[in-house]
Image (tube, coloured by chain):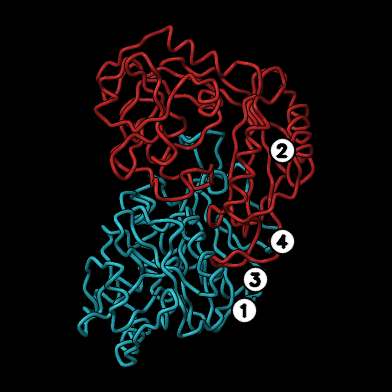
Chain colours: A cyan, B red
Amino acid sequence: MSEMPASFVWLNGALVPTGLASIDPNDRGLTLGDGLFETIRCANGIPRFAKLHLVRLRRGAAKLDIALPFDDTEILAAFAQTLTANRLEGAAVLRLTFTRGAGLRGLTPPADAKPTLLITASPLAASPPEIAAVICRITRRNEFSPLAAIKSLNALDNILARNEAVKQGCEEAILLNTQGYVAEASAANIFVLTDGRWLTPRVADGALPGIFRSLVLVHQAASEARISEADLFSAQSICLGNALGVRAVTSLDGRDIEMQQEKIAALRTILHAEEV
Amino acid sequence: MSEMPASFVWLNGALVPTGLASIDPNDRGLTLGDGLFETIRCANGIPRFAKLHLVRLRRGAAKLDIALPFDDTEILAAFAQTLTANRLEGAAVLRLTFTRGAGLRGLTPPADAKPTLLITASPLAASPPEIAAVICRITRRNEFSPLAAIKSLNALDNILARNEAVKQGCEEAILLNTQGYVAEASAANIFVLTDGRWLTPRVADGALPGIFRSLVLVHQAASEARISEADLFSAQSICLGNALGVRAVTSLDGRDIEMQQEKIAALRTILHAEEV
């Protein structure tokens, strides 16, 4: 592991030394996965596209009927405090975890739940620009669930997919939806170069509306399309991108994938463009 | 709420006063839903069908590649200690939460993770024998995921379904799978009386292999079948059952459902039969 644990976390309004930070065993984030998260890249001590992350967080919270007890200004200040307390002045990652809070046993959310907002930070290790990937066979992305469109704490399907890749000596796994169309990678959106143009799966087909993905669409650098497994193997390039970085796929299920370096570089540029 | 918080929890090998029990903010159960749970009914201070729950827990742990650091004897002793410490000598519920443990950011499980095993207990309030239900329209059960067959911490689809029921003044929601067949209720298996015989959805169609469901099948009191939405409305009775109880559905989406009391009573009897 190249990332060291940080020495402070921000929990419900205050910085707390990591070893003293404690989550209630009855927190529904733990007991039922009842919450959301965001992963925010920081460059030179500045969170990148933080507002876009917060917009997505609030959209998710609305879908789950959880009121966020902090406004954007407070959360942005918490990001800055957490980075400063951990002396993270270079490339870093903020992880925000938001849950419905503690509740007694059972699915029905308590009326008086007090949500939990946790922010942790760690240095961002440089990720490899090129990776090998597999198509995930063990599970499928459920495009029929509203969870496909929000960044929920229910990440087990993604973990299973990732483990499948790792077991085959690869870095990433590409998930198909229940109808067999391409949805996303375990922790990134997928971009498929076809006839010289980047295509990316629709949210309706199970793509998480990723922050990098939304930037690419705003820049009109890709179009949404339904993508089949066969389309992947005839692609001119495949990239996996998220808020942390863009990686080109060199092989899929052991078969070489073409790489058009200029097109890949153009996609990477978008992640480092001015914030919108 | 009729359930009072208990005063002790069992955490990783020891009883801890509830207010002092603390979960690491980096526990992957919290950050990624990376774990499992079991809900065990206790009668007269005795956990019912505890061995069946532990078999299912171990099957789930194997699917997630998490080694359970306690043997059955230790976990059964922990159940007894937790009940005694909380003076729960009557009807009670044990909730076991098992996670991969703490890890740094990212999906890939750390090689050195130390799993978390948490046991909480609460009195079991009598649940109503009859309830009103709806068919969940907001989400679908993903029968293509191995998570459908294990009791994972990824319960958000079930929470969304439950909320949909509550908003309509009902107690439970019945989830369809991605192909539109009946899978289960938000926190129970479903049993549909058809031509005088109880039918229950197959695990392959998204039914959680529930403990009560497995008892019913062992007693040959129901058969597995593919069940459509139309089948529900022509049913002679519908019951929702889990380890905690069996409830008859009086109405579905506002339409009255027939109730054959003898057949319903026969199903209830199984929950209170001798442990297998």
Q: Which residue is drawn at the image coordinates 53% and 56% (left, top)?
A: B32
- Upstream in the sequence, badge 3 or badge 4? 3
- Upstream in the sequence, badge 1 or badge 3? 3
Q: Residues within 10 Å of mark 1 (few under 14, many from 20)?
A: some
The chain carrying label 1 is A
The three-letter code of the residue at mark 4 reads Gly
Q: Are marks 3 and 2 on the same chain?
A: no
The three-letter code of the residue at mark 2 reads Val
Locate the C terminus of chain B and report the quarter of the image it occupies: top right
Circle nearer the viewer, 4 or 2? 2
Circle 1/circle 2 CB separation < 8 Å: no
- Upstream in the sequence, badge 1 or badge 4? 4
Viewer-closest of A195 and B117: A195
Residue receiving disc 4: A19
Residue receiving disc 2: B9
- Residue B261 on image: x %, y %: 41, 7
Circle nearer the viewer, 1 or 4? 4
Would residue A224 appear left or right of A274 to someone viewing this image? left
Residue receiving disc 3: A6
Circle nearer the viewer, 3 or 2? 2
Residue B192: name its quadrant: top left
Location of residue A19 with respect to A235 vertically, above or below: above
Residue A87, which numbered label? 1
Alpha carbons under labels 1 and 2: distance apart = 37 Å
The secondary element bearing badge 3 is classed as loop
Location of residue B206 with respect to A6 vertically, above or below: above
